[in-house]
Image: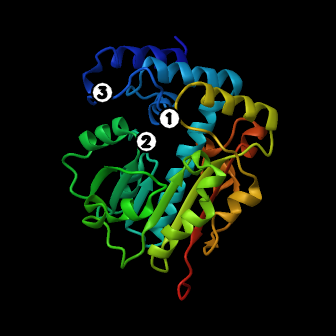
Amino acid sequence: MDQPHAQRKSAECAVSDLDWVPEGIDTTVPSIARTYDYLLGGAHNLAVDRAMAEKVVAALPGTRDLVRLNRAFLRRAVTHLVEQGVRQFLDIGSGIPTVGNVHEVARDLDPRCRVVYVDKDPVAVAHSGLLLADDPNSTAVQADLREPDDLLARPEVTELLDFDEPVALLLLLVVHFMTPEDDPVGLLARYRDRLVPGSYLVVSHATADGRPGTMRRAAEQVRESRSRDNLVYRTHEEVTGLFAGYELVEPGVVGCALWRPSGAGDVANRAEDNTQVWVGVGRKPVGGG
C-alpha cells in the first residue's frame, strides 16, 4: 500500500469514533487545523477535513511536500533560536500538535524551554491540552491572533512566559488567513511592542509569486469548503514587511526549503516548491524600541 493511501486509511480508522471531538463542534464544517493534521499524516481529523485537503491537493499538487517543508523549517528555526539562548516560545496558530512540534524540538536541546500553543480552533486546543496535560512547561490556550491584548493577557500565557525576558513569537502558515482589513503589519507591531529586545519573530506565509494560477485555485478550494477561513497570498515584499522593527536573520526572507537547510529532508523535491511559501526569522534589536 502506498504511503499516502496508508495514511488516509489510518486516519479514517482513527477518527471513526468521534468521542475525541469537543461538545458543540460542528463536524460538518472543515477546520484548517484538522486539515493540516491530515496532510501531516495525523489522525485527529474528520471526513470534511480530508475532503478539503484532497481538493487542495488536486488544485495544488505537492501540497503534502509543502506541509513537510514547513514543518522542517519549524525545526530548523526553533533549533536556531534555542542555540541563540531563547527558552520561551509563543506559537500562535499552532494547530494540533504532531511529531516534531515546538516543545519536542526545543526540549531536545534544553529541557527548560517553555512553550505556549495558541489556536482559535477548540478542537486543536482540546487535543493540545490532552497532549500536554502532564507537562508543566507547556500549555495550550484558545485565542485569536487578531486580538493581541486578550491573547497576551490570558493566564495560561502570563503564568508560563516571562515577557521581561526574550520570547520567540512563531506564526507559521497563519498570517495568510488575515485579510488586508485586519492590518497584519500593524497587528504584528502590537505583538512586537510587547516583546523585549532580543526576542524573535518567525513567519511562514503562502504566496502566489511563483505560480499565481495554481495558487489561486488552491485558495478557491479553501473558500468553497465553508472552512470560514480565507487564504490571502502576499508577495515577497509584503512578507518582508511583516518584519518591520526586526533585524532579519540570514538568509532573510526566502523560500521555505532555502532557510538554512541542514539535510536531505529539508530540500524541496521540485524547484517551484521554493516559491510557494516565504519564510523568515527576525530578531528585535537590542537597544531598539
As drawn, 102 above or below 53: below
Q: Nearer the viewer, residue 46 or 279?
A: 46
Q: Residue 95 carries which label?
A: 2
**Alpha-carbon span between mark 3 and mark 1:** 15 Å
Q: What residue type is labelled 2?
A: Gly
Q: Are marks 3 and 1 in contact (CB under 8 Å)?
A: no
Alpha carbon of mark 2 to alpha carbon of mark 3: how far? 14 Å
Mark 1, other Cα within 10 Å: few <14 / some 14–19 / many ≥20: many
The residue singled out by tag 3 in the image is: 21
Residue 190: x, y in percent? 51, 69
Residue at image point 75% right, 56% down:
236
Residue lying farthest to the bottom in this orientation: 287
Mark toward the start of the polypeptide (2 vs 3): 3
Closer-to-camera residue (103/142): 142
Which label number is shown at residue 32?
1
Q: Where is residue 259 in the image (x, y as percent from the top left)?
A: 65, 56
Number of numbered tags placed on the structure image:
3
Residue at position x 75%, y 52% from top? 235
| Residue 280 placement: quadrant | bottom right
- Answer left or right for 181 relative to 104: right
Q: Nearer the viewer, mark 2 or mark 1?
A: 1
